[in-house]
Each structure stands twice: as structure tokens, then as C-alpha cells.
Image (cartoon, helix red, strand yellow):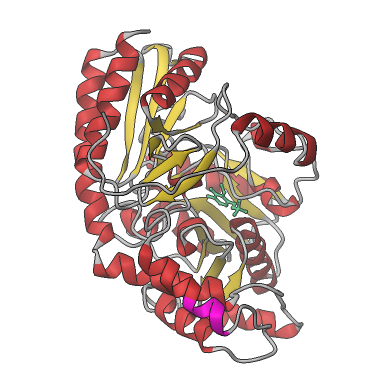
């Protein structure tokens, strides 16, 4: 059974799964997004656990969708939201409000170098839209480079930056070039960062007029299946892009706020400092909040016109975001995620010795991927088996994410309060499920 956890869920008398599911189908529109075969009606969350309509507890090893950094309904975050809501629930950008400026100051202090100017938006897509606009205005070029396995959002421009075809509708690509993915497991050049970086140079030399607006990538790919970029890749590429007049954008929507362990930001794992950083998800523990942080010089391009976001940095979200930063600092969550993450990775690698189906175990901190294959040499994606194990894990009380180019990667990205006991439970559940395949 799940590790002991001292919390009693409240009695639930609301609508049951079937009714909620029917309404979802009727009113929320169709989607290809994966659901459990038997709909799961989640009615309460507490730290790294979720509760269904029957009071059954589940280990949430996906943290919502990598959103719940501090933990579901973390008391400090709830309290900050509640206290702010009682005073002022909304302030437009026309007026001053200290909840917004306090949060901006605290957030800016988490960045190295000259990354000191904060813009608030409401989501990761909006953050990347704004970053792209800044890069284009600042450089006077329209050409952007992103990675083949990257994900940057669901708005038109960010969908163009995204190269994962499961997430794309046929829309104009708008001067976007997708570089070969520097994926040590599946990539054509293995871990050879130089060859991957050369592809970026080739795009610039042969696909553009020689000047680019910018390069954007996640520092560990999230939706693409917890893919760590080949070591040294970003250093090489940032040099190439800057020489071509472009700016370097780090999409930290999934990797920020201590998730990758030890560091606050994923870009630190590659030893680079970007010119623009975008973030969302964990920033507000799942509140609708995103941000772009950049240098005063780059930010100055937005003074040409009115740049306005009605809800961006709403005081309630800002108060919640500030509380998240304080929780990470107070509880040293980035150190914790490094510690629990290495335990989890070690246990998963042991499992890999015993099960041929585990082709790759990768990641850092609490951003971990387990890629399943039916043939280790051919790396044939084990799609059906992944789907079966996904359901089996749910039966055992463990919720994970699924992703990767072929939908054959388990994405383990729990709230940062996840413990070693939780990691053990997850690995034991995976072990048991795989033994029954
Ligand atoms: N960038 C990355 C790396 C993401 O994972 C996501 C969301 N999955 C986004 C951008 C888009 O964020 P949102 O869904 O908040 O618009």
C-alpha cells in the first residue's frame, strides 16, 4: 500500500465520474489527449497525493501537468492566495499593486547576470509568444530556430515553434526552422553535441539570410519525453546563434523552479545564461500564471508600442507565485528534488537491468523519463505496452504522465515534495506491473 500519509480527505457528495465524463464530452469539445479508459474523477488534492470520489488516494507522479511544484493545496500557497483575495482580487496594469511588484522583485533575484526585467502573462504559450516577439523586434529578423522534439505551446506562433506533429495542426510555419534534436538516446548523432550544433549552423547558413532572431529550446524536453539535450549542446548553439545576431531563449515552463534538482533553472545544467527565459506551470503551483524574464536592453524594444496583458500578474496569482518561491527557498526543494531524483533514477536503472522493455532511463532531479521499447537494438516503441502499464499503474494508485514522439515514455515529474518512500512505491508498482506483462 501507499506510504503512510496523515490526511483525511473531506467527504464528497458531488457528481460521480460517469456524469462528469458525459458533461465533459458534451460541453468541453473533443480532444485526442489521453484519458484513462475508466474516467478518473479527482475531487481533492493534498501535497503529492490526489483523492478520487471514493476517497481513494493516488500518488500524483505527474504533479497535475508538471504544474504543482510546491504540492497540491500547499498550506502556505493557499494562505497567500486567500489573504490576497480578501483584499484585492484583480488590479489592472494601469494601477500599482505591490503583490505584483513584490513578486517581480523576488523572481528577478533568482536569475543570474542581467536578467532583471519581468513581464507577467497567463500561460506558457503566451510567455513564448512574447519572447518570440521580443527576439524579432530586438534583432529585426523574423527567423527563429527551435528543436524537432520541442514543445512550446498551442497558440499559432508557439505551435509553429513546436515540431512534435501530434500537437500540431497544419498552420503556416512563419520563418521557423526546426533543428535536429540533440537526443542522446534516439538522435542521429548520439551524444555528439558538436554535430547537432553544426545542424543549427547549417540552418543559419543555408536556410536564412545569415541573420536570425533567436533560438528557443527547453533545457530538458518535457512533452517530448524528458529528453536531456546532449551535454554541451546549448553552449555551442548559444555561441552560434549570438554570432548570427540572434538571442537565446530558454523555455523553462517545465524545468524551472527547482525541478531539475540542485539548480533553480534547467539552463544551469548546461552552464549557459540565456537572453530571455520563459516560465509558467510550476511558477504558481498551477495558477494561471506565466512570465518572461529578460535584460533591460531587450525589454526596451517593447517601449515602442503599448504592451498590455489584462490579467498578467494578477495580484492573487502573484501572491501565490511569491509563496511558491518562499516554499522552495524555505524547504530547499531544489536540493530535495536532486536527492530524491537520484534515488528514483538509481532504482529505475536497477529495474532496467531486469526488464528488457525499459530502453532508456533518463532525466535530472524530479524530471524523469522511462522509455519503453519492444526491441532494445531497434528501439521499437512499445506503444501498446506503455498504454497497458499506464492503466495498471493507475489501478495500483500511481498516476504518471505519458509522452515522447511515439507516446512510449513515462514522464515522472511529481510535486517537489515527493519523497524517497513515494519513489520506492512507484518503482515497486512499475516492477509488479511489468512482471505481469
Ligand atoms: N512550453 C513548454 C515546455 C510546455 O511544456 C508547455 C505546456 N505543456 C508550454 C510551453 C505551453 O504552456 P501552456 O499550456 O501554459 O500554454
Q: Where is residue 271 in the image (x, y as percent from the top left)?
A: 32, 59
Give the quadrant of the N terminus: top left
Question: Magenta-highlighted stretch: main secondary structure?
Answer: helix
Q: In which quarter of the image is residue 88?
A: bottom right
Chain part drawn in magenta: 83-87
> In the figure, 407 relative to 129: above or below?
above
Q: Give the number of callouts.
A: 0
> In the figure, 43 relative to 108: above or below?
above
Residue shown at 34%/16% (left/top)? 433
Q: Quadrant of residue 128?
A: bottom right
Q: Position of residue 90 (x, y in %)?
A: 64, 79
Q: Can residue 194 be seen in this view?
A: no
Give the quadrant of the C terminus: top left
Residue shown at 22%/45% (left/top)? 340
Q: Can residue 82 be seen in this view?
A: yes
> On the picture, is 398 further left or further right than 250?
left
> On the picture, is 251 further left or further right than 133?
left
Residue shown at 33%/34% (left/top)? 362
> On the picture, is 280 further left or further right than 5?
right
Q: Say which of 151 and 43 sits in front.
A: 43
Q: Position of residue 29 (x, y in %)?
A: 77, 38
Amino acid at each position: 500500500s501507499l506510504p503512510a500519509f496523515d490526511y483525511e480527505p473531506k467527504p464528497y457528495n458531488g457528481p460521480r465520474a460517469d456524469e462528469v465524463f458525459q458533461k465533459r464530452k458534451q460541453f468541453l469539445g473533443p480532444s485526442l489527449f489521453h484519458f484513462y479508459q475508466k474516467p478518473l474523477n479527482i475531487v481533492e488534492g493534498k501535497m503529492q497525493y490526489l483523492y478520487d470520489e471514493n476517497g481513494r488516494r493516488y500518488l500524483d507522479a505527474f504533479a497535475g501537468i508538471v504544474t504543482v511544484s510546491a504540492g497540491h493545496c500547499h498550506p502556505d500557497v493557499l494562505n497567500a492566495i486567500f489573504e490576497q483575495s480578501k483584499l484585492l482580487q484583480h488590479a489592472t496594469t494601469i494601477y500599482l499593486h505591490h503583490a505584483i511588484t513584490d513578486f517581480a522583485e523576488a523572481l528577478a533575484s533568482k536569475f543570474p547576470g542581467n536578467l532583471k526585467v519581468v513581464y507577467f502573462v497567463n500561460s506558457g504559450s503566451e510567455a513564448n509568444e512574447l519572447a518570440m516577439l521580443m527576439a524579432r523586434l530586438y534583432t529585426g529578423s523574423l527567423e527563429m530556430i527551435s528543436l524537432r522534439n520541442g514543445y512550446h505551446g498551442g497558440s499559432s506562433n508557439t505551435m509553429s515553434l513546436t515540431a512534435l506533429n501530434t500537437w500540431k495542426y497544419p498552420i503556416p510555419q512563419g520563418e521557423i526552422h526546426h533543428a535536429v534534436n540533440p537526443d542522446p538516446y534516439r538522435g542521429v548523432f548520439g551524444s555528439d553535441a558538436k554535430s547537432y550544433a553544426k545542424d543549427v549552423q547549417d540552418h543559419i547558413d543555408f536556410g536564412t539570410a545569415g541573420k536570425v532572431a533567436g533560438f528557443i529550446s527547453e533545457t530538458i524536453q518535457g512533452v517530448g519525453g524528458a529528453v536531456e539535450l546532449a551535454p554541451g549542446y546549448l553552449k555551442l548553439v548559444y555561441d552560434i546563434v549570438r554570432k548570427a545576431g540572434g538571442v537565446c531563449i530558454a523555455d523553462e515552463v517545465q524545468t524551472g523552479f527547482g525541478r531539475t534538482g540542485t539548480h533553480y533553472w534547467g539552463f544551469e545544467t548546461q552552464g549557459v545564461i540565456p537572453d530571455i527565459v520563459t516560465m509558467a506551470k510550476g511558477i504558481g503551483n498551477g495558477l494561471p500564471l506565466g512570465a518572461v524574464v529578460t535584460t533591460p536592453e531587450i525589454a526596451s524594444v517593447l517601449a515602442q508600442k503599448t504592451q498590455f496583458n489584462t490579467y498578467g500578474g494578477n495580484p492573487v496569482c502573484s501572491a501565490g507565485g511569491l509563496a511558491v518561491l518562499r516554499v522552495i527557498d524555505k524547504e530547499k526543494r531544489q536540493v530535495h528534488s536532486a536527492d530524491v531524483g537520484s534515488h528514483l533514477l538509481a532504482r529505475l536503472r536497477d529495474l532496467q537491468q531486469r526488464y528488457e522493455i525499459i530502453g532508456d532511463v533518463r532525466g535530472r532531479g524530479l524530471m524523469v523519463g522511462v522509455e519503453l521499447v519492444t526491441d532494445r537494438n531497434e528501439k521499437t516503441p512499445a506503444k501498446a505496452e506503455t498504454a497497458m502499464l499506464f492503466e495498471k499503474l493507475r489501478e495500483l494508485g500511481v498516476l504518471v504522465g505519458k509522452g515522447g514522439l511515439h507516446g512510449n515514455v513515462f514522464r515522472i515529474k511529481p510535486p517537489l515534495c515527493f519523497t524517497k518512500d513515494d519513489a520506492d512505491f512507484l518503482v515497486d508498482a512499475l516492477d509488479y506491473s511489468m512482471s505481469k506483462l
